[in-house]
Every structure is written in C-alpha cells, then in structure tokens.
C-alpha cells in the first residue's frame, strides 16, 4: 500500500533485515538479535496466521514500523476463547517523526486486523505518555494500570563504590557481563538449603498449564496458558529466563526474567499452591544477585499481592523516570467509527473487571 510518500509493506522473511536494522537504530542491540526477535514475535506467533507488522519504506529504506502480535484470552467460566492482536514495536527514525508515518502505519495495521476478522486490539505495554496520547487522539480506552512492586538492594558506597566504578570503566566495551542468575544456577540446595526446589532454563509446561486459578474471577478474560503459547513465549531471544518449581506434592512455580547483561530481574509469572509460591518468591529474592527485582501485584492469581508483600516487595514509585515500569492495558475496536462496539462476547472491554491480568501476556518482558 502507498500512503503519501511512503510504501507500507507487511513483514515477510525477505523484509526482516530492513525491519531489524530499523529496530536496532531505535532500540539498540545487534542486527542478528533484532532479526531473531522479529522472526520469533511475528512470523512464529501461534495465534496469527499472517503477521501484522507493517514497515514504512521510502526508496527501499525502512523509516518506521508498527506491529501487532497475537494474544489469546479465555473466559474461564464458559471456556470461550478470543484472539486479540496486541500493539507493539512502534519505531520511527527520529528525523522522520511528525510527518504522518505513524498515522499511516496505524491505519494500515488496524485495517489489516479488521479484515483478518479481529474486532478489537489491545496494548499491554503502553507507558504513561504513550497511553495518554493514544487515548486522546487515537481512539483507545484505558481499562486498568498494572501496579509495580519491587525489592531494591543497597548499592555499595564509599571506597567500594569507587573501586567498582573504576573496575566497570576499565572493562567498558568488553564482553564482561553481570549474571544475575549465577547463584541461582548453582542450585538452591547449595545456596539456601531448599533442596526440594528445581531451577531450570526451560519452562515446566505441564505444571504451568495445569495450574488451577482458584480464587480468581472466573468470569473475566485471562491469558491462555496452553502449550502453544508457553513454548512460543519463552523463546524470546532478547530475554533470559529461569523457572523455579516445587514437586507435585506441593506444586508451584515462579518465572524470573532478565535482559542479558543487566542487573534487573522481573518476576514474570507464578502459580500453584500459595505456600509453594511464597517459598519460591522468597528464594528468588534471596538468591538472585540483581540490584532491582520487580513484579506486578494486581495480577492473577488472586493471592499475588499478599505473597509479594510477604516476600519483601514494596510499592514502586510511579512518578518521574519510573513511569515506564507501570504500563496500562489499552483497548480499542478495529473499526474507525463512532458506532463500533466495545463488547466481545458477553464482555465490555472498557470495564476493568473484564480483565484477569498476568504479566506474562505483556511483551514488555
């Protein structure tokens, strides 16, 4: 499709290097890593038969892109499932912003989603500024905001801090990296005495998929955690995961995520017996060497907030530079009309109680 001075083209395997180079220019990383990420997210997604990522080209050069990846939601009461494309990967070269590229990409992507049979789209990773802009001018509605909680370790001070600073400066630009999971990988039995806890690099799919959401709002929409999703979700090439789990006699699991080379860990998902989850959360805080460990507290299962509090997590400030850590869930119809419906099945998508959230559905991690 041609829109003004730009050609809007759907992502395909041949276009991957151009799209990845654009993403690299905006967000960094190697070309290989960005190619792998876009291939995983859009060409290997289990819920969309055709990728919904569009690239704006001018004379063959990629100037901007906008994507929607597939998410699946289930009504636990009725068993009905819905696929909702989720907005992501908006990238426009700085010198080409405010020239209508975003509006053109957004219009093409929404029209493609509508023609593919999707009545609504969502956004699970909109920060405060993006959420406000989307609500004001682009027809989105905010339903709820994720509530971040965190544990922050004290940083070194005085002479030790100066020594660490000189050490890092000496090795700047080298392959030296901080591994937040190095103690965890030695085994919890060796570091905390929790011999009954397993630590793996691959997800315990059967355990996660079989977790019973007791105490949850079963009439709400919740992310589908089936084998297809789990096998795809945890192949994200830009993330490093660890999976902590307890045995069948006291089943539970916790998923930790870090971006390689960083000193931050996000507790991405958990489930099972509350007693087991509490033990796993506490072990995660004790054993990882991250400077900052974060989670979202207003997510499924229903006992999440209480267990995070017991494990030492406190509310994360939402002002200033931390605003990006608390995304909103946004929703909008794919039809560009004042008469578009906000209902999906029996659900009003504008109602916060419609959604039973889990961080694992977001592409922020």
Image: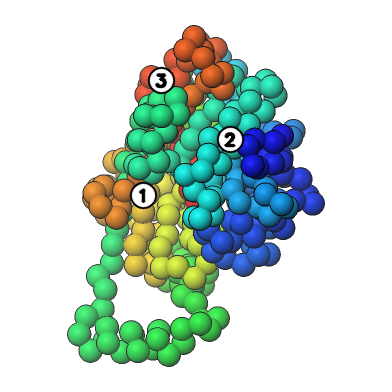
Please identify the quarter of the rendering in which residue 348 is found.
top left
Judged by depth in the image, the label closer to the viewer, 3 or 2, is 2
Rate crowding at label 1 as few (under 14), some (14 to 19) or many (20 or more) other CA atoms within 10 Å. Answer: many
Check if mark 3's residue and mark 2's residue have beta carbons within 8 Å. Answer: no
**Residue 104 got which mark?**
2
Q: Which numbered disc, 1 or 3, marks the residue that appears first in the sequence?
A: 1
Rate crowding at label 3 as few (under 14), some (14 to 19) or many (20 or more) other CA atoms within 10 Å. Answer: some
Q: Nearer the viewer, residue 126 or 21?
A: 21
Judged by depth in the image, the label closer to the viewer, 2 or 1, is 2
Please give left or right for residue 45 compared with residue 29 in the image.
Answer: right
Check if mark 1's residue and mark 3's residue have beta carbons within 8 Å. Answer: no
Residue 321: percent from left, percent from top: 29, 55
Q: Residue at x 71, y 34 (%)?
A: 1
Spatial CA span between label 1 and label 3: 22 Å
- Report if residue 211 is visible in the image: no
Q: Which residue is mark 3?
A: 350
Q: Element type at marker 2?
A: helix
Q: Nearer the viewer, residue 53 or 234?
A: 53
Q: Which numbered disc, 2 or 1, marks the residue that appears first in the sequence?
A: 2
Number of numbered discs overlaid on the protein picture: 3
Which residue is most to the front? 5
Q: Which numbered disc, 3 or 2, marks the residue that appears first in the sequence?
A: 2
Q: Which residue is mark 1?
A: 325
Spatial CA span between label 3 and label 2: 26 Å
**Residue 340 got which mark?**
none
For residue 219, above or below residue 249: above
Q: Residue at x 36, y 49 (%)?
A: 324
Residue 334: percent from left, percent from top: 56, 22
């Amino acid at each position: 499709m041609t829109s003004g001075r730009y050609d809007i083209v759907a992502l395909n395997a041949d276009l991957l290097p151009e799209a990845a180079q654009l993403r690299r220019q905006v967000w960094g990383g190697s070309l290989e890593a960005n190619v792998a990420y876009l291939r995983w997210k859009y060409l290997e997604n289990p819920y969309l038969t055709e990728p919904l990522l569009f690239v704006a080209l001018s004379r063959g050069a990629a100037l901007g892109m906008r994507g929607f990846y597939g998410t699946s939601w289930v009504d636990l009461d009725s068993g009905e499932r819905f696929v909702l494309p989720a907005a992501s990967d908006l990238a426009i070269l700085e010198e080409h912003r405010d020239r209508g590229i975003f509006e053109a990409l957004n219009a093409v992507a929404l029209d493609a989603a509508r023609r593919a049979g999707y009545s609504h789209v969502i956004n699970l990773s909109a920060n405060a500024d993006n959420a406000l802009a989307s609500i004001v001018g682009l027809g989105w509605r905010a339903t709820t905001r994720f509530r971040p909680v965190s544990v922050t370790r004290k940083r070194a001070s005085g002479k030790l801090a100066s020594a660490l600073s000189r050490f890092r400066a000496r090795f700047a630009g080298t392959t030296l990296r901080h591994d937040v999971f190095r103690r965890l990988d030695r085994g919890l039995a060796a570091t905390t005495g929790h011999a009954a806890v397993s630590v793996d690099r691959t997800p315990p799919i059967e355990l996660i998929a079989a977790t019973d959401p007791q105490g949850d709002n079963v009439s709400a929409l919740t992310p589908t955690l089936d084998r297809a999703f789990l096998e795809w979700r945890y192949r994200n090439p830009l993330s490093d995961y660890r999976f902590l789990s307890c045995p069948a006699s006291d089943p539970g699991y916790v998923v930790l995520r870090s971006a390689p080379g960083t000193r931050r860990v996000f507790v991405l998902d958990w489930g099972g017996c509350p007693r087991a989850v509490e033990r796993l959360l506490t072990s995660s805080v004790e054993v990882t060497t991250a400077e900052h460990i974060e989670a979202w507290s207003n997510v499924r299962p229903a006992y999440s907030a209480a267990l995070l509090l017991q494990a030492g997590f406190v509310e994360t400030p939402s002002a200033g530079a931390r605003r990006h850590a608390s995304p909103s869930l946004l929703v909008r119809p794919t039809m560009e009309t004042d008469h578009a419906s906000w209902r999906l099945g029996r659900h009003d998508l504008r109602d916060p109680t419609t959604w039973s959230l889990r961080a694992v559905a977001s592409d922020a991690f």
